[in-house]
Every structure is written in structure tokens, then in C-alpha cells.
Image (cartoon, grey):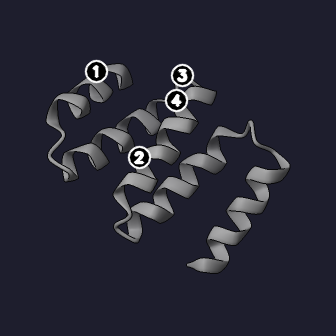
Amino acid sequence: MSKVLDCLREGIEANPECSYLYLYLGDIYLLENKYQEAIDAYQRAIILKPQFTHAHTVLAQTLMKQNRRPEAIDCYRKAI
């Protein structure tokens, strides 16, 4: 996974306004059970693209894994 993370970080460095790169970064962190890092990456994707439904949804799912239900519910609402 470290090679994938390196590629994503390089992509973000070259194109820091690409919300999809942050989404993919969050997905990798989620696979590695690095929940806070995933949350941070998903939140950055949402900052860049506020109507990014998929980012809101995976952020909500990640928050649920941490038993942060009120925040997760808010994210689910923003996704619809």
C-alpha cells in the first residue's frame, strides 16, 4: 500500500485541488484501519467539492466505525 500512498501524495502535491485524490487517499487509509487519517482525507475532499455525495457517504461510514453516530448522521443527511 505504501507505493499507492506515495503515488497519491505525489498526485496531491501536483494537483492539490483534486477532490478525487483525497477520496482515494481516504479509501487507502480506511483499508489500513487508519480511521482518523481517512476522516481527514474525506473531509478535505468535501471542502474541495461540497456536493461530493460519495465523499459524504464514506465519511459517514468511517465515523460510524468510530461510534461517532451524530456526526455520521449529519454526513448521511448531507449526502442526500
Disc 4 or disc 2, which is closer to the eye? Answer: 2
Residue picked out by circle 1: 77
Q: Position of residue 61 (x, y in %)?
A: 28, 45
Residue 52, numbered circle: 4
Label 4–label 3 contact, CB within 8 A: yes
Local packing at callout 2 (Cα closer than 10 Å; few below 14, some 14-19, many 20+) is many
Residue picked out by circle 2: 39
Disc 1 or disc 2, which is closer to the eye? Answer: 2
Disc 3 or disc 2, which is closer to the eye? Answer: 2
Label 4–label 2 contact, CB within 8 A: no
Q: Position of residue 35 (x, y in %)?
A: 35, 57
Q: CA distance from mark 1 to mark 4?
A: 12 Å
Amino acid on which the number 4 mark rests in the picture? Phe
Chain-order first, disc 1 or disc 2:
2
Chain-order first, disc 4 or disc 2:
2
Q: CA distance from mark 1 to mark 2?
A: 17 Å
Q: Quadrant of residue 80?
A: top left
Local packing at callout 3 (Cα closer than 10 Å; few below 14, some 14-19, many 20+) is some
Residue picked out by circle 3: 50
Q: Secondary structure at mark 4?
A: loop
